[in-house]
Image (tube, rainbow, N blue to C red):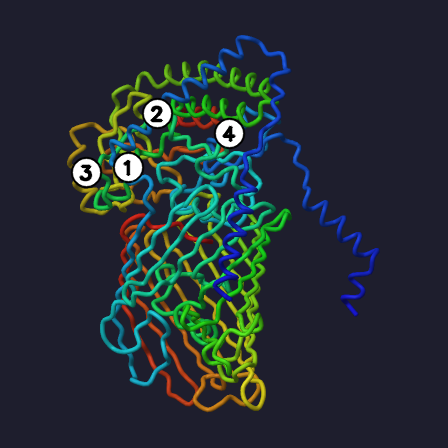
Amino acid sequence: MMRQVVLWAVMGMGFAAAAAAEPSVPADESATTAVDPELEAAAAAAAAEVAAPAARATTDAVAAGGGSRQMNPDLSLILDSAAGAFSRERHLRQGGHAIDENGLRMQGLELVASANVDPYFRFDMAVQLTEMEVEEAALTTLALPAGLQGRAGYLNVPFGRENPRHLHSWSFANPSLAHSRFLAQEHFSGAGAELSALLPLPFYLLVTADVIDPHEATGLRSSTFGTVESSTSGRLDGPEDLVYVGRLASFHALSDDWSLALGTSASMGQSPLKPDDTAALWGADLYLKWRPVSSGDDAWALALAAEYLARDTQVPGGNVRDHGGYAELNAWLGRWWMASLRGDLVGHVSGTAPAGTELGIWQRRTSVALTWLPTHFSKLRLQTDWGQGEGDRPYFASFVQVEVSAGEHGAHAF
Amino acid sequence: MFIQTLVHPRRLSWLVVAFALLAASPVLAAVQVVTTLPDFAALVQEIGGARVQVEALVRGSQDPHFADARPSMILSAHNAQLLVVAGLGLEAGWLPVVLTQARNPSIQQGSRGYFDASQVAQLRDVVAQADRAMGDVHGGGNPHYYTSPAELHRVAKALYARLVELDPAGKATYDAGWLRFDAQYRARTAVWRQRLAPLKGMAIVEYHKSWVYFLDWAGIRSVGALEPKPGIPPSPAHVAKLLAQVAPLGVKQVWQEVYQPQSLSKLFAQRSSAKLLVLPSMVGALPGTETIWKKFDKMVDLVTAP
């Protein structure tokens, strides 16, 4: 059933994209316009001269070895390794990709491939070779009309700022506590389809809706929602079993130097703690960045990112509400250095949490990091955390992280 | 209650009208153009005049390698009929995000609304086998061709042809704009060349290899760069070695762009008895460089100043 829904969604997007991309023929009014013959000759000469260098450039590309690679996807390999030390054996769980005990660890070895498939679709894929897991594999439409865009495949859900970001674009060696508790250890992700619309307004406002398959077998990763295998029937009985995600994101260019991005997200699915009942997650996020591009000092920048999440989980005997968030300040100190500070807090709001779950406890953590970027393709990070969980004494942790990226490293979203 | 108030037919009609007005924001120009660099925007404006509405995504004072993919760029690209890029990987760190999310098939690579200006430039520094051990090299060629008047003239000519193709109804405007631009180019380059003639053969040091096209055009020699390899920050050891290397060559000037750090350049200039020049590589990089002509006027003023 789910596979059929995804298939129809993909086919629908394909046909719509192809139909929308039919080239429009501009009205050729020049045929009826009287033009000076000298101007006509100049235009013809210009057109002829354009053609010649284009042919030369193609020849150069082939000579440079680009000819045989032109149709291949852009490939990159990104390695993250780190060493960690904890002051106490009992400490907060660090989350996906992070180091959870003293010693060295390869946090991730990511293979990223991306290419335009044809004029209608783009394909992007990220595979974690350390666990041989697909992190993301999606096709994206390029030519739907009316500001629409579709994605289908295995998706990192666009919930908040942190979830869609891969390990190499984090400012710290570990994810925020709120990310691990509410979204997923690595990414809130699964097989599904997405439709988004860029609204026809004078400012950027994007509305996104996702439907995610809840099967464990198809790879639902979520800290909030249960898989269909844990329901009473153990199978997908109807639309009420799916995971739904919605997001509204806006951007405001306050000036050339100041940027403000605001977002709000909501998601609904099955409770992992009470079969056939629901769980819901809400979030709001903010990103404020100052980068003095107008004065020529654009290597310096300051950015504040903050997210707040709240969750309702149906459990036997009632509902449990918990919440949390983080605020992160990043300062780019020239092209080669970045200093980061993060405050994390998650906690319980109401309801009786079942024993053995994290729903009823609070945790807090402060992290400081200094990152050195010798080039755009390598970085070395030092980080210190001070953290504490409910009923525990505080602990300190330190990390040294190295990251290298080889190949065609892709562009990053704002 | 609030929803009932909001969906009252009279209020709803006002909302619909307001939304429609916002959606149909007035665009008087026939062609909406977005360019990555301000120099291309200046060229389009010179040729298209009031018939085009043009916006540059990057400021002249900004390093085009490392721009942020601000969502406002996505909105601009969504509404554009023509996108002009420098190509050669100069915008690889941010433009692909903008292009993918623009939801605009008219400006995707391969369409007539996608104009890669590097396709008409006479490229330098084409590397047969590019490797990151060589620094952040652009295998297809040095992407800073917009520093040369001759290369921008080539780009302008091709842009003129593309504007005519996309908007045939405006051909008379573009014909006139191109002829005016071409005439001005010939007059101005004659003056610039005359003023730069005494500097032919002069030795300079660059911070980054940004100036190869201008140097070739002006007949000035670059004898080294402060960056040991493109995109690799200058190290004291490399700078000391470069100082020894260039000592017998009589370096007169050290050239850099506005967004590059100046401390090491100043030290190098001081030790080599040269003059440090912070030059406008792009339109708008310095005050008084708001057009192509003013940018090169300023370049020539600064380079020829005693």
Q: Chain of mark 1?
A: A
Q: Amino acid at mark 1?
A: Gly
Dot 4 and dot 2 within a common chain: no
Q: Judge whether residue B26 can be spotted in this image.
A: yes
Per the image, the residue denoted by label 3 is B242
Q: Amino acid at mark 3?
A: Leu
The local secondary structure at tag 3 comes to: helix
Q: Residues within 10 Å of mark 3 (few under 14, many from 20)?
A: some
Residue toward you, A170 or A190: A190
Circles 2, 3 touching at the beta carbon (< 8 Å) = no
Q: Residues within 10 Å of mark 1 (few under 14, many from 20)?
A: some
Per the image, the residue denoted by label 1 is A66
Q: Amino acid at mark 4?
A: Ala
* Earlier residue among tags 1 and 2: 2
The location of residue A179, given as percent across then percent down, is 45, 71
Q: CA distance from mark 1 to mark 2?
A: 14 Å
Q: Dividing the picture into quarters, in which one does residue B299 lie?
A: top left
